[in-house]
Amino acid sequence: MFRRFFALAVLAGAVGSSFAQGMDNPDWKEQDAPPPPPLRTTGLIPLEVPGSSLRFGVDPASVAVGKDGVVRYVVVAQSSSGAVNGIYEGLSCSGGSVRIYARHNPDSGWVPAGTTLWTPLHQTANSRYSLQVARTGACVGHAPNGNAAQIVRDLRSGVDHRFEKY
């Protein structure tokens, strides 16, 4: 029993460290973010964002985990009047922070956000949805929740089934 527990602990540490980017590691370098995918408004995974009048959803086809450990995805926000906006961002599970790469405007399409900084998830009032993405499927502790398929499964799952390996 102890051997099995120890082996699982070692494996978990190895997997976590291979994905964790370690933003506090001076040797870590973020990869260039790929361009955002076309904006989709159907088939989104709904996010519950308490206190927001907007409806949020993650495009499951946009979820990717980079070799640098950054989870990248598109979030779509819709107002009650029907206005739709997209946000292409990266999530650092190891750093507990988020970075916006581009925003989608209905008139002009994707517009690069320019030089943006990593912002702590807990200090960013405008990205409560990012915190929900991290908590409900993208991160396990300080590492990405495996690959993109696992993250999408857990974002779609009920709270009782998140983080199960199928």
Image: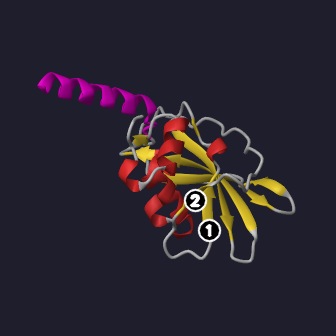
Question: Picture coordinates of residue 140 (x, y %)?
Answer: 38, 44
Q: Can residue 120 be seen at all in this image of the molecule?
A: no
Amino acid type of the residue that numbered disc 1 sits on in the rendered structure: Arg
Q: Secondary structure at mark 1?
A: strand
Disc with the residue nearer the chain's start (1 vs 2): 2
Question: Picture coordinates of residue 104 (x, y %)?
Answer: 76, 58
Labelled disc at residue 55: 1
Q: Which residue is mark 2?
A: 46
Residue depicted at x 39% and y 35%: 165
Labelled disc at residue 8: none
Which residue appears farthest toward the right when viewing the image?
107
Q: Secondary structure at mark 2?
A: strand
Residue depicted at x 51% and y 65%: 48
Between 67 and 164, the residue placed more toward the observer is 164
Between 90 and 22, the residue placed more toward the observer is 90
Residue depicted at x 76% and y 70%: 83
Q: Give the residues drawn in magenta, as a range.
A: 1-22
Quarter residue 103 falls in: bottom right
Between 34 and 29, the residue placed more toward the observer is 34
What crowding class fits label 2: few (fewer than 14 Cα within 10 Å), some (14-19), or many (20 or more)?
some
Quarter residue 79 falls in: bottom right
Which residue appears farthest toward the left when viewing the image?
2
